[in-house]
Image (cartoon, rainbow, N blue to C red):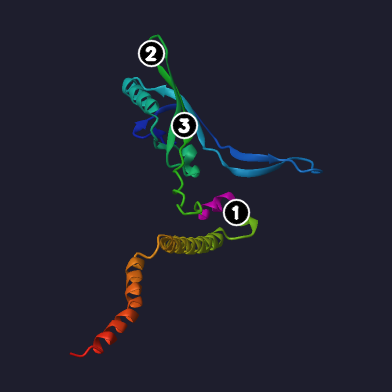
Amino acid sequence: MATPMIDDIELKAVQQIRQETHQDFALQHAIGLDGTLHQKMGRRSHHVWLWGYLLPATAEDDLKNLQEKASGGDEVTFTADIVTALKVDKMVIESFRAEQSVGPANQTAYAITLAEAPPLPPPAEVSSFGGLGGLDGFGVGDLGFDPGALGDVLSDVADQAGGIMDSVDSALDAVQQLGSLAGLADLGKIGNPLSPITDKVGELGDLSGPTQDLSNAAGGIKP
């Protein structure tokens, strides 16, 4: 059996290792059906429990390193035969316990609980409708339509909505222009500023008759 390791720390005196896998099921009850339906929601993280002793020659350094890793909470690499088929890349130390016996042997025992730390999924696609392509993992495809095709349809709807808003903006501009023209029409209430001049010209036109009479009278006087 290969020596279990947490990063570069060899656990040479391991006494027992236990690995457990738990599925995450949602229980569904159907009327008239004996038993309970189990809807799979995924899988919980793999867990590994191990306990053993630290060898006296390196016990002090190994204990210090394990305590620092457990306190830091960072991801670690765990290798052991018991997890060969699980394809576990990274784990975290959920708990660490050490016990030191008093006596000539001066042995230090430890117990460690490791849990799988899966990588985060890719970030959700940012779009005006929330990235519907990311709904594949929620079983949207089982509903009978393609989330990708739905995203294309909603994209077209968004384009149409943008065109409608442009038309509304143009209409509002036209209304504002009509309002400005209506304001110019109100200037007619002030009156024609040229009216006094045209009135005077009219008065002079009325004097053309008497002036012509005086001219005729003057032509009749002979020296």
Tell me residue 123's x, y (percent).
44, 48
- Marks 3 and 1: in contact by CB < 8 Å? no
Q: Secondary structure at mark 3?
A: strand
Q: Residue at horizontal 66%, vertical 44%?
A: 39
Which quadrant of the structure image shows residue 43? Answer: top right
Q: CA distance from mark 2 to mark 1?
A: 60 Å
Q: Residue at horizontal 55%, vertical 63%?
A: 153
In primary-sequence order, the first of circles 1 and 3 is 3
What residue sits right under mark 1 in the picture?
Answer: 140
Q: CA distance from mark 2 to mark 3?
A: 26 Å
Between residues 180 and 216, which one lies in front from this camera angle? 216
What residue sits right under mark 2 in the picture?
Answer: 106
Secondary structure mostly seen in the magenta stretch: helix
- Asked if residue 136 is among those painted magenta in the image, a careful observer would answer yes
Front disc: 2 or 1? 1
What residue sits right under mark 3 in the picture?
Answer: 114
Query: For the C terminus, which image quadrant?
Result: bottom left
Badge 3 crowding class, 10 Å Cα cut-off, few under 14, some 14 to 19, many 20 or more, is many
Q: Find residue 191 and name its label.
A: none
Numbered marks: total:
3
In primary-sequence order, the first of circles 2 and 1 is 2
